[in-house]
Image (cartoon, helix red, strand yellow):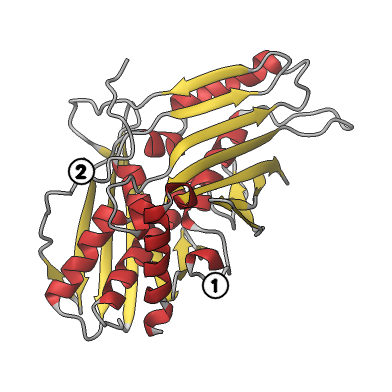
Amino acid sequence: MLNGIDLRARRALAEQIREDSWEAQLSMGVAAHPAVADRCRVRTEPMRLGSTRVARTFDIDQRCGSGADGCLDPVGSLLVALGASVAESVVTELTGDGCSPALLEVLPCVEFARGEGAARLAYEIRIEGDVLVEQARRALAAARERCSAHRTLDEPNDIKAVVQTAQDVHLTSRPVLPGTEPFVPERRRAARVMWEVGTHVLAEVDGVHAESDQPKQLFGADLAPSAQEYFLAALAAEALSFADPTTAPDTPPASVHASGRIDLRGPYSTEVAPAGLRNVLVQLLPADPAVDGDTAARAMRRWLAEGHALRLVRDAHPIEVRLVLNGEPVPAQHTENDGTSAVNDTKEQHRAP
């Protein structure tokens, strides 16, 4: 099994989900709870793959404030997710070409502009080993077209939120079109994601180490949270950071649940299907729903307006991709499926309200 990638099993799954679209639906969720000061713990919940329940639990510590060094913040989690998902797409394509890279790294980064929170995303793919230029280019194209994280961040996405109180408050944050002002970078975040074997990667963001893997049902070793779970963890942790964590001594703390769904026909087959994370729902349970409802609703509205991780997932961000093969930059060939491809357009286009 080259590179730890089971191509035969992946092809069998592609055939199965082509014949039964219900079995292609992967649903997942996470729950965030306050931990120590400026930190929360996000726990993954069992996935649902078609009619199969996938029981797996991981904890992801997230920074919710300016302190809590030593754990990821929400934007850092998104960078880990992007790098892990791209690495999986690239190594799978290279495996199909019979290539075994000596090294595969993905270097995702994001720049934030001054003012209204505009952002630019990019990543660099570094490959070393006996790989031809055209093989590397095909791997890059596979990441652009079929990588679930790339498609999630590249396209606009409605984010729905619910504040669970005596009378639930339902909110929707719709994508915002980029402004016309010149982009002036104010700060930059970057990560380094190193492929290990199969779908397992190691990552580093601002000196914090993390890892990601897929469940065994998706041909991983089940060693760590998936890239998609890092997406949801980022949203849940950031939403919780906007909610008031102060509670009475005997009162349970507030918590946030985030969920989403992926149609596996997008990333795992050649079917015309979306590849990105969809149906994102974030639910806030206040510490005391009977008392804190209005405060919690205001906090959620503020998150939907100001959250950096939320904006990255919600708004469309054309992603610059660079390819380096054995230390030499390789000009990337753009395909007709780049950007807002109809084949992989996971979200309806929206105009700013």
Q: Residue at x 55, y 37 (%)?
A: 238
Give residue 330's quadrant in the image.
Answer: bottom left
Q: Dot 1: what SS? A: loop
Can you see residue 102?
Answer: yes
| Location of residue 302 in the rendering, given as x and y in whole percent from the top left corner | 52, 22
Q: Dot 2: what SS? A: loop
Judge the density around disc 1: few (<14), some (14-19), many (≥20) Cα neighbours within 10 Å. Answer: some
Q: Residue at x 76, y 27 (%)?
A: 287
Q: Is residue 154 left or right of residue 131?
A: right
In the rendered image, the vertical position of residue 125 relative to residue 313, given as above or below: below
Hey, which residue is sitting farthest right in the picture?
A: 250
Say what amino acid the circle numbered 1 marks: Ala
Give residue 146's quadrant in the image.
Answer: bottom left
User: What's the mark number on residue 221?
Assistant: 1
| Location of residue 297 in the rendering, given as x and y in whole percent from the top left corner | 61, 18
**Of residues 191 and 343, the one drawn nearer to the viewer in this rendering:** 343
In the rendered image, the vertical position of residue 69 relative to residue 126, given as above or below: above
Q: Residue at x 27, y 28 (%)?
A: 349
**Of residues 14 and 234, the one drawn nearer to the viewer in this rendering:** 14
In the rendered image, the vertical position of residue 85 relative to residue 8, given as above or below: above
User: What's the mark number on residue 330?
Assistant: none
**Of residues 97 and 125, the one drawn nearer to the viewer in this rendering:** 97
Judge the density around disc 2: few (<14), some (14-19), many (≥20) Cα neighbours within 10 Å. Answer: some
The reply to whether discs 1 and 2 touch (Cβ–Cβ < 8 Å) is no
User: For mark 2, what is the residue?
Assistant: 341
The count of marks equals 2
Hey, which residue is sitting farthest front in the picture?
A: 19
The N terminus lies in quadrant = bottom left
The answer to which of marks 1 and 2 sits earlier in the sequence is 1
Can you see residue 191?
Answer: no
Distance (Cα) linking label 1 and label 2: 32 Å
The C terminus lies in quadrant = top left
